[in-house]
Image (cartoon, coloured by chain):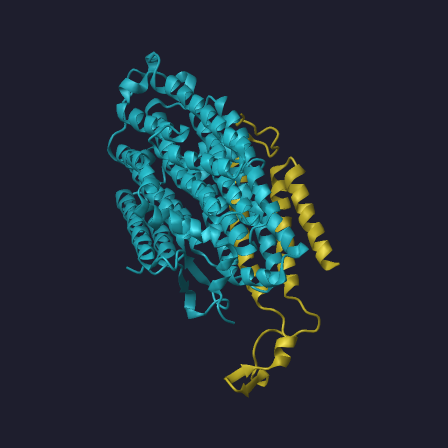
Chain colours: A yellow, B cyan
Amino acid sequence: MLYAMCFALFMLGLYCAVVKKNMVKIVLGIVIMEYAVNLFLILLGFRTDAVAPIVDRQFLETGADGMTVTGAFLRQAVDPLPQALVLTSIVISLGTLALMISVCIRIYGKYGTFDITEIRRLKG
Amino acid sequence: MNVPLPVFVMVPLMAAFVLPLFGVKGKSAATALANAVTIALLVLAVLAAVHLADVRTADNPNPREVYEVGRHAIPLGINMVLDGLSCLLLLTISVVAAAAMTFSIRYMEQYTAKSKYLSLFLLMVAGMNGVVLSGDIFNLFVFLEIASIASYALVGFGCEHEELEACFKYMVLGTIASAFILFGIGLVYGNTGSLNMAYIARSIRSSGVNPGLAFALALFVAGFGLKAALVPFHAWLPDAHPSAPAPISAMLSGVLIKSLGVYALARVVFNVFGVWPAIAWVLIALGVASMVIGVFLAVGQWDFKRLLAYHSISQMGYVVLGIGLGALILARGGSTAWASLAILAGLFHLVNHAVFKSLLFLASGSVEMATGTRQLKKMGGLALKMPLTRTTATIASAAIAGVPPFNGFWSKLVLVIAAAQAHFYGLAAVTVLVSLVTLISFLKVQRYVFLGELPDHLKQTRDNGGSMFAASAFLAALCVLMGLLLLIPALRANVLDPAVAALTAGIDYAALAKDI
């Protein structure tokens, strides 16, 4: 269910980016798409009633090959990797967003409009 | 010599952050540093290729060098892999980057903020080197974004009406492609529990492809197809490539669409998911559509750089067609030798296209700088005024049109032979036809730019010598000599064959993840 809603959000963003005429709305559509992907990545690591993936002393046991974490911890903890991925992806989308918004401002300065149907010097 | 792989990313990345500090006064120092970096990268890439050729033996036709970042073994840590295909792309990127950077010394004097330009240029090179070396699919995405963001900024570098418009269009489509790719990566991680490409290949080999993974592959084809500007994903390319400064057009058309698009697509399809007939047909369809539609759109163009940009789409079609044909033969369980021949044609054309298309873009930049226009109808008779540019441009035009003995001829010849051997006579005919149309379109360029009558306003035109000619001459020499890569067995065995072997080995890429 959550995954389906996440996918619906992605498609909503894609629709917005493809159909809208206003440049700022296109940028917003792209941002929504990126948020949907981030949400999806977080959902991959999600578990109900889980603990944070930080190894405490109580989760360590001494086995045949030295100190290892207990199986109970592995069954309980959320997956930390998607969280690291989402952080990276947020930083990347921030960079893209900043560049897109600044290009929008420059285009507004040159053309005096945000409407992409009026920004049409390139053709062929 | 064994070159540590992170060097290829670290050196340009660090230089990119140092360069803006030079400011306006240290412009010549910044230029010298940036040139030193690209030339050093070229030397390092050659050393890495020599090392890989040393490792290669008859028993081990597909050598791989692995660098484990932080010494965490696969699949725990991030790793970088240098195999034949990565090595071929690394060499191509370094050659084109060195030539484009040399060309920029003089050409970029017309723009302000040269040190920022150099910084973005090196950032793009760092991103591309990272993409081809990465053995980890999320890392590949991060490097792809580094290269893409730098290229968005470079397309809009002139900050004029057309450039900003093209930049916005490119950026929107590029970001949508990135979102697709990231979504695909999420699906792959959810289904296999790993981000390491070798380990993913291993899980897919043992458990097969489920609907989630198939959807991820579809997202990858759309995402990387957008980055590679294959028809029907090509809409941004004819705007973006002509708007960039000429050396950047050369980099974008020459290597960016290849390393971010075709390389990533081939790696994912062949080495991670493994080939099966449906995906091979998709590749062939994309290739043929790009080839035919691209070339017919190109013939009608009157803007020099726009014409070249449409030809990029068409020539990328050849590359994808070659690779797709190889995939189809492999997927049907046909002879590996014929599959290798088709893939060889695709990859060889990829390298050739990088050389001649960047040379053509450099020539168009030289003409634009001398005459101040890109409109073919406003030019004419420049053969006498610009003999150096004319010579290099003619060599490149002959190469792209497939005139013997230039490099383009050999790759197209191999592709036609491979298509005929696989009994796709129709495809072989289409390949030859597209090549003829390309020839017509470049005869038009010759006729309107270099021959005909010299208009009055161009009487004072001067040729561009110095660094701009040096860069063009270097690429033109490669155009003439690269046929030898195919004809001399020793060169072919050490440069092209390992790259082909890396793809035909297919899902054996999983062997990298030995133990867990």
Residue B217 in picture, x, y percent from top left: 60, 51
Residue B65 in picture, x, y percent from top left: 39, 60
Please determine whether, in this image, residue B227 is positioned above or below residue B386.
below
Single out the residue that lies furthest toward the right: A1
Left or right: where does residue B2 sit relative to residue B151? left
Residue at image location 66% in from the left, 66% down from the top: A46
Answer whether residue A36 is visible to the viewer in this image. yes
Residue at image location 49% in from the left, 65% down from the top: B513
Left or right: where does residue B300 sit relative to residue B124? right
Single out the residue that lies furthest toward the left: B466
- Front residue (pair B428, B220): B428
Residue B52 in picture, x, y percent from top left: 34, 56
Please determine whether, in this image, residue B348 is positioned above or below residue B360.
below
Left or right: where does residue A90 sit relative to residue B489? right
Residue B30 in picture, x, y percent from top left: 29, 46
Answer whether residue B164 is visible to the viewer in this image. no
Please determine whether, in this image, residue A67 is positioned above or below residue B415.
below
- Front residue (pair B80, B11): B80
Q: In which quarter of the image is the N terminus of chain B?
A: bottom left
Q: How many labels does the image show?
A: 0
